[in-house]
Amino acid sequence: MSLNWLEINRVLEELPLEGAFLQNIRQSSYSHLIFEFHRPGRSFNLLISLDRNTLRLHKFTGREPSLPKPPRFTSYMRSRIKGARVLKAEQLGCDRIVRLDLKKGDNYDILYIRLWGGASNLILCTSDNRILDAFSRRPARKEVPGELYLPEEGGKPKKNLEARPLPEGFESYSAYLQEFYAGREETEDMDRLRERARKGLQIRENAVCVCLKNLEERLASYADEEIYRNRADILMSCLHLIKKGETSFTDEASGEKISLDSRKTAVENAQDLYKKASKASRGRELVEEEVQNQRLKLKSIEQKLAGLDEISDPEELKELAPREQTQEKKPVKTVPGLQFESGGFTLIVGRSAKENEELLSRHVRGNDYWLHTRDYPGAYVFVRRPKGKTIPLEVLLDAGNLALFYSKAKASGVADLYYTQVKYLRKPREGKRGLVLPTQEKNLHIKLEEERISRLKGIT
């Protein structure tokens, strides 16, 4: 609800604008400007809101932080009219346009404050109404520098239009308006935050659903594991029937025809099939684990969406909302493996030799930490260490639990780990992909804590 012309007059009657000096101009948001005035023995602030839903001006007694960098029009007003004296302040008839006549040195300027719902604006003009600049430049209305601005004064007021009465307990009309609009804007801000949070959660939900679909397609591609293994078993049981140089073999019992590499023996062909089966098995295990993680994430997002209307903390809503981009996006490097957050530190789990190799060569630095189970095969866990920060014990324990959870020692629930900085890892000459030898390592005994794993996975 915007102010009508009667309410604007009530505000102007309360404000001692004429004779006051404009000490400063601040902008606290895109639509809120604060003019700081001073006259002998008295200082006061005038808030001007150009927001379509809360168009108004009134005396302001609170403190709103300024924008880090003043926008174009605010900067121009500071250079042109800061320090000016208000010679006259009036509303033009009943048209919801306030005119401030300002004098600074030899400059005599006019600031028009137009509080129209569809075309609110601040227009700074010279004494002959030639536009110097405007808050919103509108070429279609000829509200641009250099054009002539001649607002029509007056206009017939709407019938039965009244000013809202001043409720008991308020010392001034401005005090009433400030409280009225503060509550309304707070509600609107929360509604906007909630919608942004809903959008952010829905984006995350869609991303997880797409990821799950891709993972399920990958799972289907690993369905040939048993076929490879059965074919290998057939070849091993029929070695005496297969000669080197043959391109295929047909099993009499099952009638299945198996393609062969003619350059290899039957044993070598069988070994190739066993390797394919083993690769499919390892891939299926990794993907099944990732499917479980993504389903847990999806469940967590769905729970947050369901409880979104109950959240009353704006900071919590800001955490859920997508971050606003203030500059062009830089290309983001895709980090392989699983990522977790712990106390402001990023933990990365490389679950295969390929992921470990890529992490070591492209995504971790010398001062980052590396953890791995002793005497058991398992994942590499990396702790990214920001410059100048020491890794807390709790973060190290989180990383250790992940290393245990993603290793063959998971079943026993306890294991010894070693950890060191990435710069102390050595790659053996002609070693397997992803293989490293640690130096200057330290020992860490870990007992698996399911609560830590659930917290890191975001399970609520």
Image (cartoon, rainbow, N blue to C red):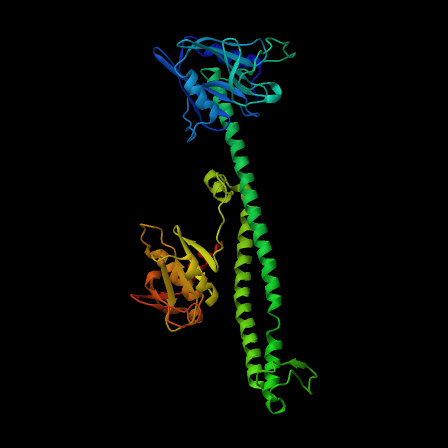
Q: Residue furthest left?
A: 440
Q: Is residue 401 above or below residue 46?
A: below
Q: Is residue 303 above or below residue 148?
A: below
Observer-nearest of 403 and 68: 68
Q: Is residue 28 above or below residue 128?
A: below
Q: Residue 62: image x %, image y %?
A: 41, 24
Observer-nearest of 451 and 34: 34
| 407 with respect to 5 (left or right) | left
User: What residue is shown at x 48% (from left), y 59% (from top)?
Assistant: 336
Query: What is the count of numbered marks?
Result: 0
Observer-nearest of 141 and 183: 141
Q: Residue 206: image x %, image y %?
A: 59, 50
Q: Residue 376: image x %, image y %?
A: 40, 72
The answer to whether residue 169 shows anywhere in this view is no
Image quadrant in which you'd find residue 340: bottom left
| 72 with respect to 247 (left or right) | left
Q: Residue furthest right?
A: 255
Q: Is residue 194 above or below residue 54?
A: below
Q: Residue 121: image x %, image y %?
A: 54, 20
Image quadrant in which you'd find residue 103: top left
| 433 with respect to 228 (left or right) | left
The answer to whether residue 425 shows anywhere in this view is yes
Quadrant in the picture for the N terminus = top right
